[in-house]
Image (cartoon, grey):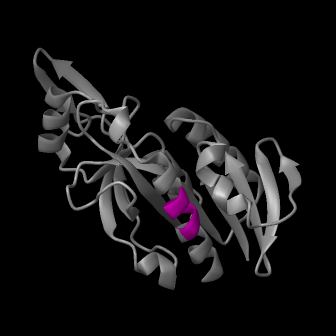
Amino acid sequence: MRILIVAATTAEIDPVVAKLGAASDRGPRVKTYTHAGHEVDVLVTGVGMVATSAWCSRVLALTRYNVGLNVGLCGSFDPALAPGTVVHVVTDRIAELGAEDHETFLSIAELNLPCEHEFVNTAPPFNAALSRLPAVTGITVNTVHGNARSIAAVTRRFKPQVESMEGAAFMYACLIHDLPFAQVRAVSNVVEARNRDAWKMAEAIHNLGRTALGILDHV
């Protein structure tokens, strides 16, 4: 099989590529590895929706894959999803698309504008390691939440469990290209008034790498 792994940063994917052996350059930002008889391309897009959309679209237009896997970190709105927890994001949306009407936020749906903004993974690849992860609902944002007022507002609006800066863009690209996919993320922090001292980045990255390798082993 040919597998595409997408991450925003090298830090999020380092524990995985460390186990994949020697790499060869496939093109800009893409390195190719082999694992368990599969060809694994790793794409590091850079942070954010625009970079993820652009690079995923470029790579998927050039190469046909059997499965896509997005790995990264996320913040948790859900008290049951503590830092270090690894989740499978099955529904995601671009949360900030819309307009302000004085103190009211109008979503893109409320504005009645033609725009894809919510994405559902109705047919993730069958994978024993993936099936053991909590299936959650996410939002994708340009500005991660760190203010009590905005956290309360987005929670009322969408009831998300996690947030990232890339997930919906990856899902959209895969859906356009008819590529079976999964978005897998590890919780690095609780979404609250910004408190970097409470973040557990190292634990989240370690757990993410272990889980991603488990998924690869079950492809």
Measured as percent of width and height from the top left, residue 158 is found at 19, 46
Asked whether 182 or 217 is in front, the reply is 217
Asked whether 154 or 62 is in front, the reply is 154
Residue range corresponding to the magenta coloring:
206-210
Asked whether 95 or 16 is in front, the reply is 16
Tell me which secondary structure the magenta stretch mostly adopts: helix
Using the image, determine if residue 194 lies above or below residue 125.
above
Residue positioned 29% across, 34% down in the render: 113
Using the image, determine if residue 9 lies above or below residue 4.
above
Asked whether 218 or 180 is in front, the reply is 218
Q: Quadrant of residue 141?
A: top left
As drawn, the residue found furthest toward the top would be 102
Give the position of the N terminus as an image quadrant. bottom right
Q: Quadrant of residue 34?
A: bottom right
Asked whether 65 falls inside the magenta stretch, the response is no
Q: Horizontal placement of 163 versus 205: left or right?
A: left
Q: Horizontal placement of 144 versus 102: left or right?
A: right
Measured as percent of width and height from the top left, residue 178 is found at 56, 65
Residue positioned 20% across, 56% down in the render: 79
Measured as percent of width and height from the top left, residue 98 is found at 27, 29
Asked whether 209 falls inside the magenta stretch, the response is yes
Measured as percent of width and height from the top left, residue 73 is found at 46, 49
**Would residue 152 be visible to someone looking at this image?**
yes
